[in-house]
Amino acid sequence: MNPAQDRYTDRHVREDVSLIDVAEGYAQAYTGDFEFMVDIRDRLRDGQRLTVTQVRGVLNCMRHDPRVGHLPVPASGGGARVIRLPAHLMVAPPGDDESRRPPYVDAAVRWKKTYLLSHHRSAQVIHHLDARRSYVRFHRGGNRSRPRIVIQTVCGTHWYDRQPGFANLECITAAEATALVTSGVWRPCRRCEVLTQSER
């Protein structure tokens, strides 16, 4: 394990953009249950790019993974040296039995209520639920009694079950959504409306 002063910094990432591809490649192949890495992997699978800070975090996780080879030690002193990782940086493949097992299993969920709202006092918008991108997922090696739940809307807003505001969410039917909008307290998300109509 490298000393704390040899950790990667944001400056390393800014000065060598090739580190982004290295970090993203490692995160996409990640099969463990460390919450930070699971979140990063899911962001990439959703088509999102990583921030400099997230890339730095992945690189520092790689430093402590014994399966990662040829990962140079960052320069100490605030990252004055630009790091060039070898193109042949490899992650050792898992054993045959493990490689045949998927890293996660998605539950067969049917979303019967297709609208979503938050009961937070500052929220007054009703979104369309994106059933194709929302899921209930059980990760291998994690706590199987507690799945990972991700709720996404047509407009691109998403919530994770570990976020503080997740408990305020409620799925509702189209009739319930119409009644709330008619009451004048809630309003429909305009972006959800436009995108939903364009798909029809």
Image (tube, rainbow, N blue to C red):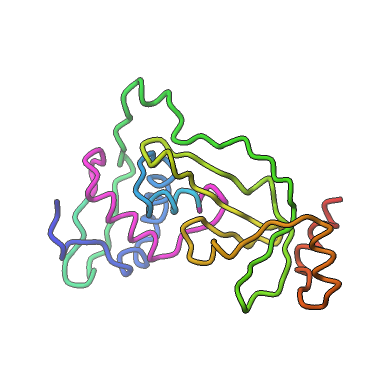
Q: Position of residue 137 (x, y in %)?
A: 52, 41
Residue 71 in the figure: left or right of residue 147: left
Q: Which portion, as a residue range, is magenta?
A: 43-71
- Asked whether 64 falls inside the magenta stretch, the response is yes
Residue 183: quarter of image: bottom right
Q: Residue at x 38, y 39 (%)?
A: 31
Q: Residue at x 63, y 62 (%)?
A: 157
Rendered view: 154 above or below 123:
above
Q: Position of residue 134 (x, y in %)?
A: 62, 48
Residue 96 in the figure: left or right of residue 43: left
Rendered view: 114 above or below 90:
below
Farthest residue toward the top?
A: 96
Q: Position of residue 89 (x, y in %)?
A: 30, 42
Residue 192 in the figure: left or right of residue 38: right
Rendered view: 169 above or below 113:
below
Count of picture labels: 0
Q: Residue at x 56, y 44 (%)?
A: 136
Front one among 136 and 36: 136
Front one among 119 and 187: 119
- Asked whether 115 falls inside the magenta stretch, the response is no
Residue 57: quarter of image: bottom left
Residue 84: quarter of image: bottom left
Front one among 18 and 125: 125
Q: Position of residue 45 (x, y in %)?
A: 53, 47
Q: Residue at x 55, y 37 (%)?
A: 106
Front one among 82 and 183: 183
